[in-house]
Image: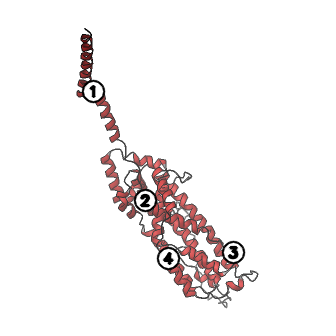
């Protein structure tokens, strides 16, 4: 008699199981399908993640590491002739093309620290078709990146940050150049060795040329920090600054690389594009001319005090000049023409030959002044 209830219980369990299986076979509900559709649509409208490849960080690390080392050059007061040669070796140890490329790459990472610029660019990355169009325009014409929202904020960061390097190098240059004159004074105890002709002049010149040809290697630690800063938009602790157009070609290219990164188009797959954008002929020319002037200066220099001048003018000052010209455009402001009326008529006088005085004696030109040539004399 107990088997009948047991059979009824088993039947009920079977019915419930059948209902569950039936519900599973029927698939998700309309509400679930709608939720899945909305989730997929939302995911499709999210821009790709920011991506800036390792090559940009490595190039930037070369510039950062060299400028940090160059800023340790002693600003005058050299105790002996060897300290001058050591400073020349330190300042000459760069390849012009690599340093120029590094400056632009560093500028791109600086631009990525601007939330305004990154957000302004990323709004165009939501729609895939529009994103591809913007990427193509930047690759074809890097100046297009300078028209994107927030470009003035990013350009301001680039100019102010690299500008600090320029100011520091110019201050060192002024101290060194002044020391080239101070050390010649009769009261300066260094005068004896400073005015003595340098031994092995050709060897030191060839050494400077060799150091200029050595390939500069990126710092692994510096590269990792810059890579993280470029892809996260944080880590450099920069003070906000704003700079409107026009921009130099180097700043334009830094903005273009940063814009590609913000669009998610600056990763390893786009390394060809980012590397091409780091090449800028004006910046490279300035640094190459600086090296040429340094070699000519060292070739003409005889005593140590003239080497001091070569160091100040064609290492430290030229570095300041080239970094400034890479980020700043010099603007000449001309006032409105003023109405002054017709000039008064001047009576014509009969010319009489003027008595020619004997030429005044001029002091001998210090040899150091003859070495005063270079890209600019700022």
Residue at image x 38%, y 59%? Answer: 142
Q: Which residue is mark 3?
A: 77
What's the distance in space between the residues labelled 3 and 4, CA to CA? 26 Å
Q: Which residue is mark 2?
A: 54
Proximity of marks 2 and 1: CB atoms separated by less than 8 Å: no
Local packing at callout 2 (Cα closer than 10 Å; few below 14, some 14-19, many 20+) is: some
From the image, which quarter does the N terminus lie in?
A: top left
Q: Which residue is mark 1?
A: 30
Q: Earlier in the sequence, mark 3 or mark 1?
A: 1
Q: Earlier in the sequence, mark 1 or mark 4?
A: 1
What's the distance in space between the residues labelled 1 and 4, CA to CA? 70 Å
Residue 291, visible in the rendered structure: yes
Residue at image x 64%, y 74%? Answer: 176
x and y, in percent, of residue 124 in the image: 37, 47
Q: As drawn, which residue projects farthest toward the front?
A: 1
Proximity of marks 1 and 4: CB atoms separated by less than 8 Å: no
Camera-nearest label, 1 or 4: 1
x and y, in percent, of residue 7 in the image: 24, 14
On residue 212, the disc is 4
Helix, strand or loop at disc 4?
helix
Helix, strand or loop at disc 1?
helix
Name above or below for residue 128 compared with residue 221.
Answer: above
Local packing at callout 4 (Cα closer than 10 Å; few below 14, some 14-19, many 20+) is: some
């Amino acid at each position: 008699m107990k088997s009948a209830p047991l059979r009824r219980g088993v039947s009920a369990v079977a019915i419930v199981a059948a209902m569950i299986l039936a519900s599973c076979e029927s698939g998700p509900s309309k509400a679930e399908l709608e939720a899945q559709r909305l989730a997929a649509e939302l995911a499709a409208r999210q821009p790709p993640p920011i991506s800036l490849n390792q090559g940009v960080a490595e190039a930037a690390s070369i510039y950062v590491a060299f400028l940090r080392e160059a800023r340790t050059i002693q600003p005058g007061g050299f105790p002996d002739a060897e300290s001058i040669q050591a400073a020349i070796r330190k300042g000459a140890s760069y390849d012009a093309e690599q340093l120029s490329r590094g400056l632009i790459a560093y500028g791109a990472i600086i631009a990525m620290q601007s939330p305004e610029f990154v957000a302004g660019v990323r709004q165009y990355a939501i729609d895939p078709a529009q994103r591809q169009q913007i990427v193509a325009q930047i690759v074809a014409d890097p100046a297009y990146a300078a028209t994107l929202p927030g470009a003035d904020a990013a350009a301001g960061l680039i100019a102010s940050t690299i500008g600090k390097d320029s100011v520091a190098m110019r201050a060192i240059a002024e101290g060194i150049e002044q020391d080239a004159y101070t050390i010649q004074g009769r009261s300066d105890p260094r005068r004896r060795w400073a005015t003595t002709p340098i031994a092995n002049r050709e060897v030191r010149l060839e050494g400077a040329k060799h150091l200029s040809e050595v390939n500069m290697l990126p710092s692994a630690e510096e590269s990792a920090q810059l890579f993280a800063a470029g892809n996260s938009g944080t880590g450099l602790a920069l003070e906000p600054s704003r700079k409107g157009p026009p921009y130099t070609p180097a700043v334009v290219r830094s903005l273009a690389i940063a814009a590609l990164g913000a669009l998610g188009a600056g990763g390893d797959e786009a390394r060809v594009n980012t590397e091409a954008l780091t090449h800028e002929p004006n910046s490279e020319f300035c640094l190459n001319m600086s090296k040429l002037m340094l070699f000519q200066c060292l070739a003409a220099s005889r005593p140590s005090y003239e080497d001091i001048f070569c160091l100040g003018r064609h290492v430290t000052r030229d570095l300041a000049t080239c970094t400034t010209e890479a980020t700043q455009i010099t603007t000449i402001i001309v006032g409105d023409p003023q109405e002054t009326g017709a000039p008064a008529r001047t009576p014509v006088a009969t010319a009489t030959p003027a008595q020619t005085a004997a030429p005044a004696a001029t002091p001998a030109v210090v040899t150091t002044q003859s070495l005063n040539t270079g890209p600019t004399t700022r």
